[in-house]
Image: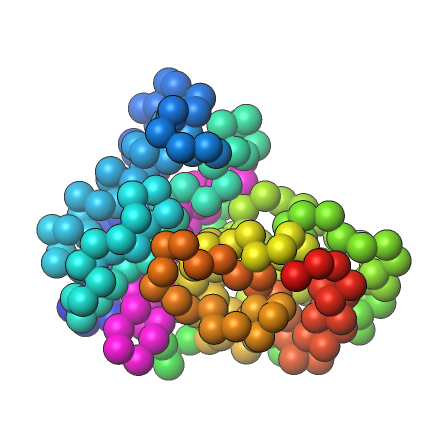
Amino acid sequence: MSPESLLELFHEIADAVHEQLATVTDWGPSGVRDSQYVADLVADEAVLTRLRAAGCGVLSEESGSENLDRPIVVVVDPLDGSTNASRGVPHFATSLCAVDASGPLVSLVAHLAGGPRWWAVRGGGAWRDGRRIERLGVPTWEQSVVAVSGRPPESPGWAQYRSFGASAIDLCFVADGTVDAFIDMSPSAHGVWDYSGAMLVCAEAGVDVRDAQGRELLVLDHAARRTPVAAPAGIMDRALDVRRRLPL
């Protein structure tokens, strides 16, 4: 599939997930595994139906991996921020990232509660609702507003922080300048589906995304967990310094 057709497919999938979630009446646990909701499975089915029809391999948070030997494998979090969604907090998304032999190729992060969509194509820039985004000006660390997952250490030196609860969106907020950095404060808590879609958006917007331990982030392994940190180059060292004050 061409990058253009993949991106079109991803928009269709995000639309389908949005439509299916509108029919959900049970926002409770799925009973299948811890921290999974019925809505996660509804969203996953909407995604899988379309990716299978397109002949893609899949690595999904909710259903695991299949056909990882295909030329295109899509890493997907069908409902990132599902706890937010279950509580009526309007901050959750579908995240998709197509990976080929050279790495991330096309990605889309679709805010499903009335927010924007971000997308990127390798070498083709990053976009928010059709407007190209690029991080140019970088604040000092002391002026920065930082999104976090988990509990930060004492006196991190930034101006303010926010904990939104949906890392795919939070990372895209770094790409478009809504916040200045993102730090996962929990030890190796994120699967590749949590950050891969946003990682390409960040890369194309000029924002670095690293693992706090220096490990490879793009791993097609459902069991792997990482500690992503995202920031423009001018404040990345400060962000990593804060994260090193906590257990890895």
Q: x and y percent of residue 214 in the render?
A: 57, 75
Which is more toward the observer, 175 or 80? 80
Instruction: Give percent across and percent down for residue 128.
Output: 46, 61
Q: Residue furthest right?
A: 155
The spot of residue 247 in percent (x, y) is 71, 58
Whether residue 177 is situated above or below residue 83 in the rendered picture:
below
Q: Residue at x 73, y 48 (%)?
A: 151
Is 27 left, or right, of 20 in this rendering? right
Please tell me whether residue 147 is drawn above or below residue 48 in the rendered image.
below
- State the residue in front, 214 or 152: 214
Q: Quadrant of the C terminus?
A: bottom right
Query: 181 left or right of 201?
Result: right
Query: In this view of the protein, which residue sits in the foreground, 133 or 229?
Result: 229
Q: Residue at x 18, y 70 (%)?
A: 71
**Residue 42 falls in which quadrant of the image?**
top left
Q: Is residue 212 magenta?
A: no
Q: Residue at x 55, y 26 (%)?
A: 87
In the rendered image, which quarter contains the N terminus? bottom left
Residue stretch in magenta: 90-114
Residue 13's x, y, as percent? 27, 47
Residue 207 lies in what quarter of the image? bottom right
Which residue lies at the image location 18% right of the left edge and 48% below the top edge? 50
Whether residue 243 can be seen here: yes
